[in-house]
Image (tube, rainbow, N blue to C red):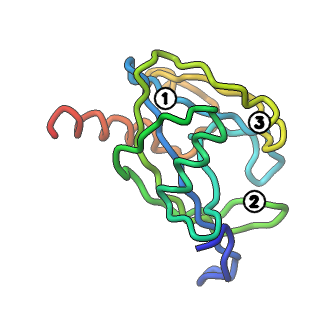
Amino acid sequence: MTETDTADDTGLPVRHAGRVIVLDPGNRVLLLRYDDALPNGRHWTTPGGGLDDGEDYAAAAARELAEETGWHDMVLLREVHRRSLTMEYGGRLVRQHERTFLARTARPARPLGDVAQMHAADGIAAWRWWTLAELDATAEVIWPAELPTLIRQALAEEHTG
């Protein structure tokens, strides 16, 4: 698969992407902020991005996580979500098919590595660790909107699995 393939039934170009929900020991989640023009607008989302030639979703998610955080020691635990959405990418609307994986860091509120230049180039305006209570209470746009539910489901699976 490549980052953008031919159009799907929506008539839009298709993009495939892998994303990662990274939780720290306090179950805070790392989110990155993009201050995009409409239609995406300003939003917070998990690390991730498009598949390169020959990559599968997990490989792309792991690569993007390393690129966006500077962490090269993270292990993806399991896939936790799939979704498709219409969004702007590269100056045009695309139909993005995403798979999201769970990962954990042992360091509370782990700082990012030397990624300032990468963030500037990719339009990442800010990053921070969020608690579930903060996600529940925020007026900020979070992608995906169901992220608090996904985290709670992942935590419940950890306790029953």
Using the image, tell me which numbered label, if any, was put on residue 119.
3
2 or 1: tag closer to the N-terminus = 1
- Of tags 3 and 2, the one toward the viewer is 3
Q: Residue 152 carries which label?
A: none
Q: Nearer the viewer, residue 20 or 53?
A: 53
> Is 107 situated left or right of 67 in this image?
left
Q: Alpha carbon of mark 1 to alpha carbon of mark 3: how far?
A: 18 Å
Mark in front: 1 vs 3: 3
Indicate the position of residue 24 as horizontal and vertical percent values.
43, 23
Mark 1 closeness class: few <14, some 14–19, many ≥20 residues within 10 Å: many
On screen, residue 80 above or below 124: below
The residue tagged 2 is 88
Label 1 sits on what residue type? Val
Q: Name the residue under label 1.
A: 29
Quarter containing the N terminus: bottom right
Per the image, label 2 sits on a secondary structure element best described as strand
**Kind of residue at badge 2:** Glu
